[in-house]
Amino acid sequence: MQLFLKQGFHDTTLAEIAEFADVSTGTLYRYFPSKGDFLLEVVSDSVEQLSVFIEDLPRDGVGVEEALVATMMKDIQNTAEQFEKIEHPHQLAKLGEGGEKSRCLSSSVALAYSRAMYASPASFEREKEMRAKATGIYREILDRAKEAGQLEEGVDSSLLANLIVALYLSEFDNGIFQSNYPYEAKFKAGISFLLEGRTRAVEKEE
């Protein structure tokens, strides 16, 4: 990702990526036949990290809203780290601080990812699988909340999880080039709206 942001997606070759990663070109081609496959793998890795993250989330004493926002913020942080090893999620704006050229290079990566999704039926199916896995992560949090009595039983976890993913993607796009974009506050407001009247109080452990 660092090479794509520095040189542009189209001007970066797989040979350069292999050299940067200190692997042979043949090895890279075996796993990533195209640069688009490389981008899909980056997103897939972020989703896998989210799966690990929610397994470590405390199941007691943590409200459903808190758990959802923490997961969304972890997703933002994963993305920041994939781009430029940025340590704090609010520093995603740094991707645009290099001026117009930097913003164009970053935008070219985002556009390349969109094209990679539709490059072939297999790529599109993979994107759908990753989106479904991300949705499943949020659905699991919601289902846990139901089991713990934090969330009303009648809530449609699948529908709500899809809305949460849509909220995440919308705010990600809104804030990626803005300095100190309030991701956490935006996520909290959105989750609070989606869960309004559907939650029950959770007791904090002493």
Image (cartoon, rainbow, N blue to C red):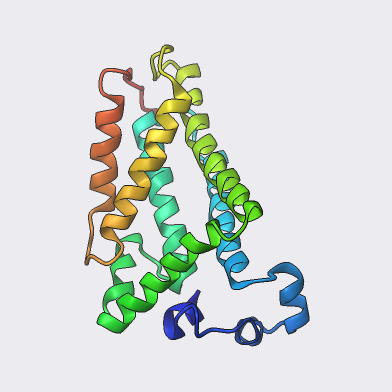
- Of residues 193 and 169, the one drawn nearer to the viewer in this rendering: 169
Q: Residue at the top extreme?
A: 154
Residue 53: give x, y in percent of width and height: 53, 46
- Of residues 99 and 117, the one drawn nearer to the viewer in this rendering: 117
Image position of 129 (left or right of 146): right
Seen in the picture, residue 136 relative to 10 is either above or below; the reply is above
- Of residues 127 and 24, the one drawn nearer to the viewer in this rendering: 127
Q: Is residue 66 visible?
A: yes
Residue 79: give x, y in percent of width and height: 45, 61
Q: Quadrant of residue 94?
A: bottom left
Residue found at x 29% / y 43%: 187
Residue 144: give x, y in percent of width and height: 50, 25
Residue found at x 23% / y 46%: 185
Q: Quadrant of residue 181?
A: bottom left
Residue found at x 50% / y 38%: 135
Q: Considering the image in quadrants, where does the C terminus appear?
A: top left
Q: Is residue 61 visible?
A: no
Residue 179: give x, y in percent of width and height: 22, 67
Image position of 21 (left or right of 46): right
Q: How many marks?
A: 0
Seen in the picture, residue 17 relative to 150 is either above or below; the reply is below
Seen in the picture, residue 99 relative to 197 is either above or below; the reply is below
